[in-house]
Image (spheres, rainbow, N blue to C red):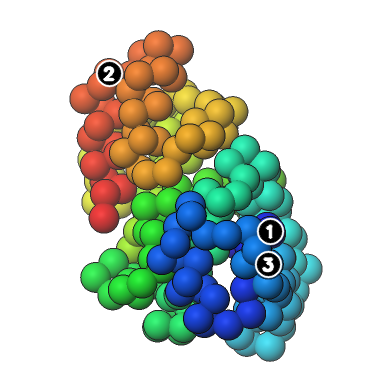
Amino acid sequence: MLHKGYSTMTTIADLLTAWALGSFAPVALLINHTVFYPDITYGYSGSGDSTTARINNVIYHELAHASHHQLVRDPTWDRIRFHVVANSIFSGDVYGFPGNFALIGSDPQFTAVAEGWAHHYGDVLAGNPLLEGRRFRNGFVPWGLGLDLSDQRRLGDLSGYDDNVCCFTDGQYFSSLPLTITMQQLRNRYLNVHINTTSNTPAQINNLFDNYNF
Ligand SMILES: [Zn+2]
């Protein structure tokens, strides 16, 4: 996740105040996010090793976030900012899990949109193998969606769901992100705009996105 913005915070009370006020939060709430997290994190992993490959992955993942942030800016980005901080505090996991998200500050829809893009395109930029059939991270981040939208159709294999969609581009994925706050809005972009560039049907697109519901 990327932390960058003007509405910085130093205390849990600041976080909760900003969340409660939403778009009415005063810009005067100028405190510092970095008390919670730096902008981009690429430290040692849980195993104590920070390999070149891991740093490569993290940097490209964060750059994918940075490009997305440039499209939507603040305060939209506060949705994932607050989600990550709230769920870190609540469960110790930055993303949290469906059915157990922090009660205040969570925004799993926008987090799914943002982390789905960064997990997919970070892998593309890093040159990682794109693993067919990899579906979610934490049960809701649609890690495999970008690959399923772009690669060949895949029916009846052992991954547990059909991917009967092909041929969309990462450029189309990226161009879907402005004004997209929820997974339904992302789906609508493919149904209403991008579909005309491919042979996919609305039913096929809906079936694929249904696999990524949470
Ligand atoms: Zn991320």
Q: Amino acid at mark 3?
A: Leu
Q: Are marks 2 and 3 in contact (CB under 8 Å)?
A: no
Which residue occupies the foreground of this view, 30 or 189? 30
Q: CA distance from mark 2 to mark 1?
A: 42 Å
Q: CA distance from mark 2 to mark 3?
A: 48 Å
Q: Is residue 64 visible?
A: no
18 in relation to 176, above or below:
below
Mark toward the start of the polypeptide (2 vs 3): 3
Q: Is residue 184 visible?
A: yes
Which residue occupies the foreground of this view, 33 or 71? 33
211 in relation to 174, above or below:
below
Residue at 40 percent across and 83 percent down: it is 91
Q: Are marks 1 and 3 in contact (CB under 8 Å)?
A: yes
Residue at 30 percent across and 29 percent down: it is 205
Disc 3 secondary structure class: loop
Q: Amino acid at mark 1?
A: Tyr
Image check: 176 left or right of 166? right
Please identify, in this view, whether the residue under mark 1 or under mark 3 is nearer the observer.
3
